[in-house]
Image (spheres, grey):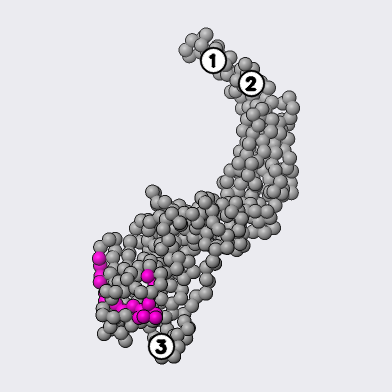
């Protein structure tokens, strides 16, 4: 069997130490090439990119070659501005290394090349270069904004350009990093070509932190499209608040961390305006809202124009939990609203003070339709985990052309 020079040197050292006995150091002297400081390998290798000069094209391959008869390359590490290592492949003979993943655009690379000569002495050469900026970028806006949220809050990523190709979607998804609490399983779901949502399998654990960032800056998404930088977000998850509204019993139950804190008599949507069944996530709170029927297409004898206080929004189309002093006599007995959940002013004030964006509000036993999964707030929890995972480009992938999120922010119904 033919050994490489380095292997022959190591075998020779082993044999000599064995013959001299324990404590012998014949191979540790200055004549041992493995103990020498690395020499400058600049004359030993060639580099196909113009290092330290004008920016190089990130779409072109990066190749490092050992000159014939000069030894071999033993290792190459290429790291960009953001600490990302460029994947590459070294031939078995050690005569050539090339990148196996595209370089990032608009970044600085530091490339360290380790070599050895014919005697096995180590060499080292560091190269540096910039890649040219991307001509077209994909910006990612992460949501929600940094702050405190309930256990049901999904994470959103809105893309500046549509991404339809499944391979490109996989690149995007790999670059969207969610640092979850230990043991939490979660997945992204492609709602459509420009919207990706993330949720855990179960609600977020209470009193934990979730950090979200994009690692796509400079990364090649597809031909002539590279990722842009984006602002990271951090979610501080509060108590596990779960609200259940039983439309048939005309009652709302407020639980915090599994304990029933309050039970409130309510009224929900009357026939023809029934409140949607299903899990909804609190979208925000408004102390005062002017609610008008014509903003949601309600007129004639059903028209209303009311000042409403302590309003907690759960859908974009105008479903709130709010104070309804005009229906106190019906609260706890019958459903008389146009879709919202109404309660007394005192109860609404308490609810308003104790509910947080991202908390879970579930409606059961209504004769209304089911809450949409997308497009009218956050209905993600109404999709089972199996189907949610199938919306990931890293698993089975998604179908192109899903219905887009309705970005309209409609006025409320009462």
Residue 288 in percent (x, y) is at 40, 81
Range shown magenta? 260-277
Q: Nearer the viewer, mark 3 or mark 1?
A: 3
Name which of mark 2 and mark 1 comes first in the sequence.
Answer: 2
* Farthest top residue in view: 19
Nearer the observer, 136 or 81: 136
Residue located 34% across and 70% down the image: 363
* Structural distance between the alpha carbons of marks 2 and 3: 90 Å
Q: Residue 315: image x %, image y %? A: 43, 72
Q: What kind of element bears circle 1? A: helix
In the image as oriented, which residue stretches furthest toward the bottom?
Answer: 301
Q: In which quarter of the image is residue 169?
A: bottom right
Q: Nearer the viewer, residue 346 or 410?
A: 410
Tell me the crowding category of disc 2: few under 14, some 14 to 19, or many 20 or more residues within 10 angstroms, Cα based.
Answer: few
Q: Residue 302 carries which label?
A: 3
**Which numbered mark, 2 or 1, is in the foreground of this view?**
2
Q: How crowded is mark 3: few (under 14 residues within 10 Å), some or many (20 or more)?
A: few
Query: Vertical placement of 64 versus 408: above or below?
Result: above
Closer to the camera in the image, 56 or 42: 56
- Residue 14, label in figure: 1
Residue 124 in which image quadrant: top right
Q: Which of 96 and 407 is in front in this view?
A: 407
Q: Can residue 212 be seen in this view?
A: no
Nearer-N-terminus badge (2/3): 2
The residue at which mark 2 appears reads as: 4
Quadrant for the C terminus in the image: bottom left
Name the residue: 60% across, 23% down.
34
């Amino acid at each position: 069997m033919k050994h490489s020079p380095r292997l022959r040197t190591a075998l020779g050292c082993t044999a000599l130490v064995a013959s001299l006995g324990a404590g012998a150091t014949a191979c540790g002297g200055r004549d041992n090439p493995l103990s020498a400081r690395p020499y400058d390998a600049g004359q030993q290798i060639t580099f196909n990119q113009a290092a330290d000069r004008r920016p190089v094209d990130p779409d072109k391959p990066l190749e490092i070659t050992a000159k014939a008869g000069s030894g071999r390359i033993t290792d190459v590490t290429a790291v960009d501005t953001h600490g990302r290592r460029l994947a590459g492949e070294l031939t078995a003979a050690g005569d050539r290394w090339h990148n196996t993943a595209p370089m990032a655009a608009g970044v600085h690379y530091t490339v360290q090349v380790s070599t050895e000569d014919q005697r096995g002495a180590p060499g080292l050469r560091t190269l540096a270069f910039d890649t040219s900026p991307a001509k077209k970028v994909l910006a990612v806006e992460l949501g929600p904004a940094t702050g405190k949220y309930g256990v049901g809050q999904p994470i959103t990523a809105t893309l500046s350009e549509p991404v339809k190709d499944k391979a490109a979607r996989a690149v995007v998804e790999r670059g969207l990093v969610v640092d979850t609490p230990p043991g939490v399983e979660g997945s992204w779901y492609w709602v459509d070509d420009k919207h990706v949502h993330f949720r855990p399998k179960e609600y977020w654990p209470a009193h934990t932190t979730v950090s979200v960032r994009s690692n796509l800056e400079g990364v090649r998404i597809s031909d002539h499209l590279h990722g842009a930088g984006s602002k990271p977000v951090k979610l501080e998850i509060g108590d596990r608040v779960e609200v259940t509204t039983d439309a048939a019993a005309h009652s709302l139950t407020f639980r915090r961390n599994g304990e029933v804190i309050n039970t409130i008599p309510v009224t929900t949507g009357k026939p023809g305006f029934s409140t949607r069944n299903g899990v909804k996530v609190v979208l925000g709170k408004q102390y005062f809202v002017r609610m008008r029927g014509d903003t949601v297409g309600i007129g004639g004898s059903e028209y209303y124009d009311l000042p409403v206080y302590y309003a907690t929004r759960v859908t974009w189309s105008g479903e709130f939990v709010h104070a309804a002093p005009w229906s106190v006599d019906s609260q706890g007995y019958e459903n008389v609203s146009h879709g919202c959940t109404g309660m007394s002013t005192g109860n609404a004030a308490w609810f308003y003070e104790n509910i947080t964006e991202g908390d879970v509000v579930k409606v059961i036993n209504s004769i209304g339709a089911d809450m949409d999964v997308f497009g009218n707030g956050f209905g993600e929890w109404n999709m089972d985990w199996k189907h949610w995972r199938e919306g990931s480009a890293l698993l089975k992938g998604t179908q192109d052309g899903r219905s887009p999120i309705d970005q309209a922010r409609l006025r409320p119904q009462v």
